[in-house]
Amino acid sequence: MEVFDRLLELNANFLKKYYSIFLSHNMKYIKEKRYDEIFSYKSAEDLKLISYLLQHAVNAGEISLREELKLAGANYLRILRALSLASCISDIITGVPKIENIDSMLASQKLATKALFLPKIKNV
């Protein structure tokens, strides 16, 4: 759980640094191709990292997953993105960024991560 928490914190720091780009990425009428490329690349890298972490945890006997790891990772990332969007939707609508919304997003993502993975952690 500590690794997931650190990963979520790293992502939150990334979003704080590029918050305006994150908001504009979610506004269809402002989208630019270069932003799509940045977020597509980041999404692919996130999936690789999550899949690697899940595979490592399964191989080490730390968690038990019955789902295919890439699918589990992709679904986990979808949940994180949905929580990101839910936490920042007012900023997207108003166009007024409030970076403190990232902190509520991070708290929601940590809770969701615990709900998803704590039941799968094996006693080692």
Image (cartoon, rainbow, N blue to C red):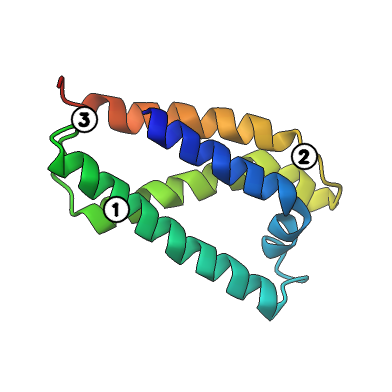
Identity of the residue drawn at 78% across and 70% down: 30
Q: In the image, 118: left or right of 63?
A: right
Q: In the image, 118: left or right of 47?
A: left
Which residue position holds label 3? 120
Q: In the image, 34: left or right of 93?
A: left
Dividing the image into 4 quarters, which one contains the C terminus? Answer: top left
In this rendered view, identify the residue nearer to me: 88 or 15. Answer: 15
Instruction: Report how far apart the C-alphas of labels 1 and 3 lie in the structure.
Output: 17 Å
What residue type is disc 1 on? Tyr
What residue type is disc 3 on? Lys
| Marks 1, 2: nearer the viewer | 1
Where residue 65 appears, as percent x and y from the top left, is: 17, 41
Instruction: Report how far apart the C-alphas of labels 1 and 2 lie in the structure.
Output: 30 Å
What residue type is disc 2 on? Ile
Where residue 95 appears, as percent x and y from the top left, is: 84, 53
In this rendered view, identify the residue nearer to me: 18 or 78. Answer: 18
Where residue 85 appears, as percent x and y from the top left, is: 61, 47
Q: Neighbour class for label 3 at 10 Å: few (<14), some, many (≥20)? A: some
Residue found at the far bottom of this picture: 33
Q: Which of marks 1 and 2 is nearer the N terminus?
A: 1
Circle 2: element type: loop
Which residue position holds label 2? 99
Which residue position holds label 1? 52
